[in-house]
Amino acid sequence: MIDFSPTPEQEALRAKVDAFIRTRVVPLETDPRQGPHGPSEELRLELNALARADGLLAPHVGKAWGGLGLDHAGCALVFEAAGYSPLGPIALNCSAPDEGNMHMLELIATEAQKERYLRALAAGETRSCFAMTEPAPGAGADPDLLLTEARRDGDHYVVNGRKWLITGAQGAAFAIIMARAEEGATMLLCDMSAPGIVIERILDTLDQGFAGGHAVLRFDAVRVPIENVLGAAGEGFKYAQVRLAPARLTHCMRWLGAATRAHDVARDYAAKRRAFGKTLGEHEGVGFMLADNEIDLHQSRLVIWHCAWLLDQGRSAGSASSLAKVTCSEALFRVADRCVQILGGMGVTHDSVVERIFRELRAFRIYDGPSEVHRWALARRALRAAPKGH
Amino acid sequence: MIDFSPTPEQEALRAKVDAFIRTRVVPLETDPRQGPHGPSEELRLELNALARADGLLAPHVGKAWGGLGLDHAGCALVFEAAGYSPLGPIALNCSAPDEGNMHMLELIATEAQKERYLRALAAGETRSCFAMTEPAPGAGADPDLLLTEARRDGDHYVVNGRKWLITGAQGAAFAIIMARAEEGATMLLCDMSAPGIVIERILDTLDQGFAGGHAVLRFDAVRVPIENVLGAAGEGFKYAQVRLAPARLTHCMRWLGAATRAHDVARDYAAKRRAFGKTLGEHEGVGFMLADNEIDLHQSRLVIWHCAWLLDQGRSAGSASSLAKVTCSEALFRVADRCVQILGGMGVTHDSVVERIFRELRAFRIYDGPSEVHRWALARRALRAAPKGH
Amino acid sequence: MIDFSPTPEQEALRAKVDAFIRTRVVPLETDPRQGPHGPSEELRLELNALARADGLLAPHVGKAWGGLGLDHAGCALVFEAAGYSPLGPIALNCSAPDEGNMHMLELIATEAQKERYLRALAAGETRSCFAMTEPAPGAGADPDLLLTEARRDGDHYVVNGRKWLITGAQGAAFAIIMARAEEGATMLLCDMSAPGIVIERILDTLDQGFAGGHAVLRFDAVRVPIENVLGAAGEGFKYAQVRLAPARLTHCMRWLGAATRAHDVARDYAAKRRAFGKTLGEHEGVGFMLADNEIDLHQSRLVIWHCAWLLDQGRSAGSASSLAKVTCSEALFRVADRCVQILGGMGVTHDSVVERIFRELRAFRIYDGPSEVHRWALARRALRAAPKGH
Amino acid sequence: MIDFSPTPEQEALRAKVDAFIRTRVVPLETDPRQGPHGPSEELRLELNALARADGLLAPHVGKAWGGLGLDHAGCALVFEAAGYSPLGPIALNCSAPDEGNMHMLELIATEAQKERYLRALAAGETRSCFAMTEPAPGAGADPDLLLTEARRDGDHYVVNGRKWLITGAQGAAFAIIMARAEEGATMLLCDMSAPGIVIERILDTLDQGFAGGHAVLRFDAVRVPIENVLGAAGEGFKYAQVRLAPARLTHCMRWLGAATRAHDVARDYAAKRRAFGKTLGEHEGVGFMLADNEIDLHQSRLVIWHCAWLLDQGRSAGSASSLAKVTCSEALFRVADRCVQILGGMGVTHDSVVERIFRELRAFRIYDGPSEVHRWALARRALRAAPKGH
């Protein structure tokens, strides 16, 4: 039966996270232990400790591995609340790329792999990265262009290649590496301390919120034992979808919270700043922007909830998550862009969190598949639904 | 608990309506008994008879009055399915303005008024109109400008004034007239045969689907007995909201079906028409339009369902219906506009139902409150949520 | 030297046309001799007589053939002024498709062909049509799909095929037929009275302003003497470009005038109609629409002037006219769409010329190449400018 | 006569600047002497020396003061070419705020003031700032809210107040201060070394290209001799318009160059990067973005040229510069945004100049009057053109 009421348990948890973010996390937003490549490890650990103390760590992870065991609908509520602060998802240990990695490990790793990699990761003791994207002419939006090789040598794979824009690599305990093996695209778990893994540099980027930033990595004959294959060799792209479809959606959830924050800041400013004889908000030119924000936020939330519900039903949600990703990334960017505009000069300074959210949301339109790839997928699906026989 | 599954009963009814529309109604779309002011009365009665035979008449009306007694969520499913054909809502007797009038009568009319006006209306035996909008400088988007007067004279009101864009007046059995009485804005039930009611002319308009078209009415000292006051005198604007909030939403439901139809037509055309070496749909320039259609349709549906759910909960839905109206009218118009574009020359001819849907949807961005009025209402609500004390 | 001043002669002529349109043509806009397929032949002849009396007929045609001999820049000014009324271009005998046909005839017809076809056409004594577009799966946006055949038989071509959306065919004295001959695409001048030319029907379309409407034509073994080949056989597509590049631009000029008209109507309405305590125009939600109109009109005018200047320089203007077409058709449609919205209910009735302009402008986004074809051409040109050797 | 040909002299100078930028300035874009608050003073002086050596310094300044004496049309060509590199306008000493300050000084300063302030500024020996904007609740988009006071004390004004977002204050030799005197808003020339001028801090902002960044200033009883009044006391707002109308336009010119650069980078990338079996540019989803870029760039250029021509004619260009500002800032931002999208991950890294241009252009939609203020001005002008007497 069509119902838009969260359960009482969901509501209670959301309220708890909401209060946690506003009272414990927001005050740390101006903490100086943040730079162009995100919060320092020290700050991250402090944030995790706060969440741990309140029983809010790793909400998406199964209880067996130290999390709260939420389903996707539950995550939708909690991640949005967490995303209200740029530091919120880091505090709750549900930010990218760790969150998606935990999800995939829980689904396809062996018990031994989980013990070794997932447990500490879920506890916030370690970080991880997902090494898939490559510099041109390698794998970007089109994964088939994968150039990194994993050559079998006895009971090891020997990995050679370069990766790029690898979020969180700096400071990560391990990487999940996508490489081309004889069997096909294959994912390998690999300690970042392994000989031959070189962090060439950390990129300076428009977004600056991810712990560790985005790195350029090189693999110089890195040896990975075959028991570190994640899932089955050759099934890498299939597993990547297991990771990416929900990961796209959790991105949407977090950014929905961020855009809501920007909207609240802009609305409060519009309600008090005066110009030309009335408050900004009383000018329709500004008021209509607030209205459009409400529309974009509401639609994004509904699309997220619907896709989360599909995933919770165990139904195929590839198209739904494509639709959610393109919808939310564009709608939430519009919200952030309007908020910058409403704030005027204030909106382009670091004095306002809105400027930060704006930059993060611009990047979101590219990360996890640019809008164009998702529109293309949606178009293909639409056309397949046309009657045959023409 | 968040749930996007219609009940089995809702699903069954939707499927039944869906089949009815496709097999019985769509073939009548090219019936020549349609003109610039909608289907002829003869055609309308035939369509009603078909729906009656299948037990599908007046789905939104209580069973006591001959309908199916659906709640708003049920209507969301059924009205969308009905809207798949421009003739569908007329067939099911759930098109504007009758549908909204039935809803209001059921809520606020006396039993005697219901017997006299609602029963025949719900049965499809009569039609009705809602006489509120006035030509400039009278009441349009701003109801406070109401100029039509209802002067008390013994046990009658004497109504003088002019109305404009009154949908369905031609051929209606009765009107609900909004007039300014001593007590304030007041709604009166009035037979269209009453002396002094003059249909000055029927307007030619962009949209041509409403039975009876849109008329200019004049009231020359029309006498309405006081027992024909609908609800309490002076409460006209309050009741109008009772009518308008759900009526806006049912408009959205029907037009969602229409836009879906346009999308299906355009998609099927794009899947087979070839140009420059491939099908139109394989050109990303067209494929992306189909993708954006899917996005707009999906979002509109979710927004409608959410607002319907709010109404079914008995919760205040003024803002939600404003949001739904502005969202859906603009999103669905974009869909229709893209479909015209995809069809090319075909899309601007009456040979395709898409051209008709395009025209109807353009008008929908104005009827029941233009986007600007709804954005203004949303902005005001947003600003009220800002912290006080600045 | 960069200069945006028309010459004094251009200014004087523009002012004269402007006055002519406002005093002589606008009053005829409500003349009942107009229907779904444009003005009647009687009304057209009356309009031409008025323009002839003022020395304004066929401004784009050489003086030798009875016109004013304007260059493209001169046409830009005069056609815009003419377009201020939907009947203006018809009055001045510079509306589509005749205007483009005259232009092409003047450029590539033999003297004999000109005497026979151009002289009477320029004088407004006859009308013509351009029979190129075919129903699916024939030539539409992609001319290579041309199916109509011209088979050589002695000193005649025998033409078989079907055409569609042929503007002005009904009532035309002659057609320019694009057909596939042995030599390739070939254009043939053919009297509409020729045996075997059948007007299957006149399409009902969104736009209703073209004299004669848009027809479906059939050629049943129509015999065309070889001296009626226009230009050289096999060069049809090349000549079509000669016709289409400027014809696209003259469309833009006329529609710029139409959109300016719509804007003036909406602005005047916004300046006086009151709602919620002030005029509509004082509401920023409406005022900003007027501002955006001014922006769109100004940009369109500059783009047109620039392309006209290029053409007058004898420079290649294929890309520039593609750019002008896509820019103007979309910008001017936005203007019309906003004007409908500003007028509210009035904007969707035939009572306002805005509704008519809205419908015409929607069709303009498709006629003479839909936006997608022009964007594709612009993209291809942009990419060709990229450095080679990658 | 309508003409879009620059003069041969203009063409030659444009070509010279173009070559200078590409060969001398672009290679310095990765020079490490740049930070969050623009290039260092050392780098700036080096850039100026390069331009001086080529005779390209201060193109907009009269020859008497060391410049090239270009009119606005000439500036349009040269500033666009300079803007192709973010360092170009700094190199040519024609970047904001100095360029606008020079323009105003040349127009309204006394000879003594010019000798003292303009000569060194035009020579690139000093920098300047324009101290008008104030933090809330002071003067922002609405200058009437001006709070900074200039109290007359003998032959001095004593200035107290705070300013905010003052570009280039750090490192400037002097400021032009807008303050409220008894006579009304008044502009004062003031050495930055004057006692009581405090740079509270330099703001961190989305844009990072202006030399000196954007500062927060405080005036603590700063004494300014009355001979340092710029123009007449009380005429500050009038003079601000003298500065702002052309300054808005020169902003547009420079940013047009920047957006063209972004487009070239994106186009070249799209022409070689492959995905899904072809180059990015061959995907219509990307190709259409390139087409839209070409459209936006072309329109912006025409609008700029037109406004420059108006200014060169000595005609009132307040509305035209408002229109140019809102048009260009939005169109050029769209270009930059599309370029980021085309570049994908590369587009959000500092590795590409596109990311930098994107940030600068976002800020441009706010600086020198946000879009909303300009739309409001355009609307007001449009409404004034409506017929009176309603």
Image (cartoon, coloured by chain):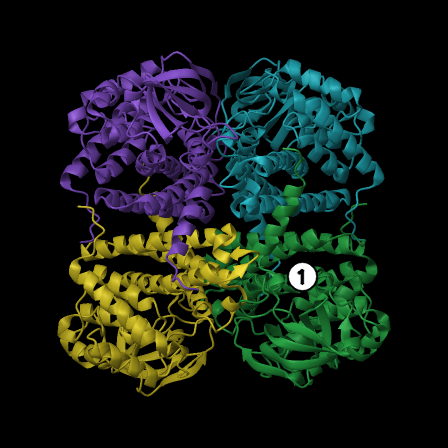
Chain colours: A purple, B yellow, C green, D cyan
Residue B240 location (% of width, % of height): 28, 65
Rendered view: B365 above or below D295: below
What residue appears at the point 59 percent right and 50 percent down from the top-left corner? D378
Q: Is residue B1 visible?
A: yes
Figure quadrant of residue D59: top right
Q: Nearer the viewer, residue A93 or D217?
A: A93
Q: Is residue C160 left or right of residue A180?
A: right
Horizontal and vertical percent position of residue D321: 65, 43
Which amino acid lies under the numbered mark 1 shown in the image of this protein? Arg
A62 vs B132, nearest the viewer: A62
Work out whether residue B376 can be spotted.
no
Q: Which residue is mark 1?
A: C248
Residue that appears at 52% across and 33% down: D139
Residue at 63 percent across and 27 percent down: it is D86
Image mark count: 1
Check disc 1 and report its element: helix, strand or loop. Answer: helix
Which quadrant of the structure image shows residue A55?
top left
Q: Quadrant of the C terminus of chain B?
A: top left
Q: Residues within 10 Å of mark 1 (few under 14, many from 20)?
A: many
Q: Residue A135: x percent and y percent?
A: 50, 27
Task: Say above or below: D356 vs D327.
Answer: above
